[in-house]
Image: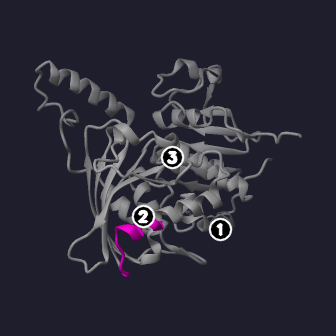
């Protein structure tokens, strides 16, 4: 049996934490091989010479980081660029090849889908429209803001009950603010433990809660409505009202959401359990063949004090949504439910989730070997 030739992938923004997460997610991948790596500030260095934020395979250490330029020997590009440079560079590559991104640069464009395969795979049909409108050979498909992944997946599973109103509080890991902030958390813990006053060292992550993350609540609402919207010729956003508060907490990895959902149809905890289990069966049927898909899209936890980021963020390779504390919402006439949901912000919510999206686009013919 002849093994299919791997698709040659490039990584934009490889020297940052998100770029290195792509290196880790693509390590030993059966469909993709890392052929080129790009970085504006680190061009000319070998991968082995850059600061390592996460584990990535050392056999790639000899790859030389290049200035971003379109190379005809690539089949696709993964982008880990900040939003500002992504506006120019992602478009430059998309004129010639598919770009799968974790950047926010193009999320709000009307011809660009924000894809989570388990939630809105039908939105991939927008790709052809994007190509026609922009005259591109390739396309741009971004993933969502990492905060909302667990909300999008669990709300999709409850779609049959009619989502009317969503209220949430998010408790977001420091790594979501960037790996340099994660290092700052470690430094502040050491200083505080030595009795050093931190009041003049804003932002204070150690032993602290910060009840505001700039523009995060607006992003969550806007993106959730787009992702959960219906697609015909364009996306009609979800009409439900969405309100929330985003909080930074002294946790390294894993975003936790406390969800309160009002529905049009009546439901109770047992029906939610059944809906989540059926959703898992459906996703296993549609996406179980993808290399990065978890065993269960939603992992239902029976323990009264779970999920917890420290214990559960890495379950199923960091690709499952952990849900617990499912219970009725009082005062809603049997049409309200609440639960706690946890996602891995650096894996399902970022690079590994983007790789899963690329696997889906390859399987369904949107990405092909050049």
Please state the horizontal and vertical placement of residue 370, each as a whole percent of the image: 80, 47
Q: CA distance from mark 2 to mark 3?
A: 20 Å
Span colored in magenta? 264-275
Q: Is residue 297 left or right of residue 287?
A: left
Quick one: label 2, few (<14), some, or many (20+) residues within 10 Å? some
Q: CA distance from mark 3 to mark 1?
A: 24 Å
Residue 272 highlighted magenta (yes or no): yes
Q: Earlier in the sequence, mark 2 or mark 3?
A: 2
Nearer to us in this view, 157 or 29: 157
Q: Which residue is mark 3?
A: 319
Please state the horizontal and vertical placement of residue 91, each as a whole percent of the image: 60, 52
Dot in front, 2 or 3: 2
Quick one: label 1, few (<14), some, or many (20+) residues within 10 Å? some
Residue 291 highlighted magenta (yes or no): no
Residue 96 is labelled as: none
Nearer to us in this view, 139 or 264: 264
Helix, strand, or loop for circle 2?
Answer: helix
Identify the residue shown where x is 64% and y is 60%: 285
Helix, strand, or loop for circle 3?
Answer: loop
- Check the image and name the residue furthest to the right: 1
Please state the horizontal and vertical placement of residue 35, each as a whole percent of the image: 70, 33
Q: Earlier in the sequence, mark 3 or mark 1?
A: 1
Helix, strand, or loop for circle 1?
Answer: helix
Dot in front, 3 or 1: 3
Quadrant of the image occupied by residue 124:
bottom right
Nearer to us in this view, 108 or 22: 22
Identify the residue shown where x is 60% and y is 52%: 357
Residue 125 is labelled as: 1
Quick one: label 3, few (<14), some, or many (20+) residues within 10 Å? many
Q: Which residue is mark 2?
A: 273
């Amino acid at each position: 049996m002849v093994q299919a030739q791997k698709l040659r992938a490039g990584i934009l923004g490889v020297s940052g934490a998100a770029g290195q997460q792509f290196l880790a997610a693509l390590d030993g991948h059966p469909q993709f091989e890392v052929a080129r790596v790009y970085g504006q500030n680190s061009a000319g260095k070998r991968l082995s010479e850059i600061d390592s934020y996460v584990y990535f395979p050392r056999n790639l250490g000899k790859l030389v980081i290049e200035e971003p330029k379109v190379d005809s020997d690539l089949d696709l590009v993964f982008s880990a660029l900040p939003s500002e440079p992504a506006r120019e560079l992602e478009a430059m590559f998309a004129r010639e090849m598919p770009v799968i991104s974790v950047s926010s640069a193009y999320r709000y464009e009307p011809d660009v889908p924000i894809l989570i395969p388990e939630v809105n795979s039908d939105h991939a049909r927008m790709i052809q429209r994007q190509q026609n409108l922009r005259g591109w050979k390739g396309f741009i498909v971004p993933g969502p803001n990492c905060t909302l992944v667990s909300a999008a997946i669990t709300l999709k599973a409850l779609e049959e009950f009619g989502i009317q109103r969503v209220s949430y509080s998010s408790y977001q890991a420091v790594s979501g603010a960037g790996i340099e902030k994660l290092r700052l958390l470690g430094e502040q813990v050491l200083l505080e433990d030595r009795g050093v006053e931190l009041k003049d060292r804003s932002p204070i992550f150690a032993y602290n809660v910060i009840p505001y993350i700039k523009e995060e609540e607006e992003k969550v609402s806007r993106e959730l409505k787009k992702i959960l919207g219906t697609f015909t010729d364009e996306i009609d956003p979800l009409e439900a009202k969405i309100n929330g508060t985003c909080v930074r907490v002294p946790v390294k990895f894993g975003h936790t959401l406390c969800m309160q959902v009002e529905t049009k149809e009546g439901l109770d905890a047992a029906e939610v359990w059944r809906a989540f289990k059926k959703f898992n069966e459906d996703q296993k049927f549609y996406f179980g063949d993808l290399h990065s898909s978890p065993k269960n899209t939603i992992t239902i936890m029976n323990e009264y004090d779970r999920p917890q980021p420290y214990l559960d963020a890495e379950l199923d390779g960091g690709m499952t949504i952990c849900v617990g504390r499912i219970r009725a919402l009082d005062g809603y006439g049997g049409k309200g439910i609440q639960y706690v949901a946890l996602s891995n912000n650096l894996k399902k919510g970022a690079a590994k989730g983007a790789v899963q999206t690329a696997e889906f686009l390859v399987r369904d013919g949107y990405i092909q070997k050049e």
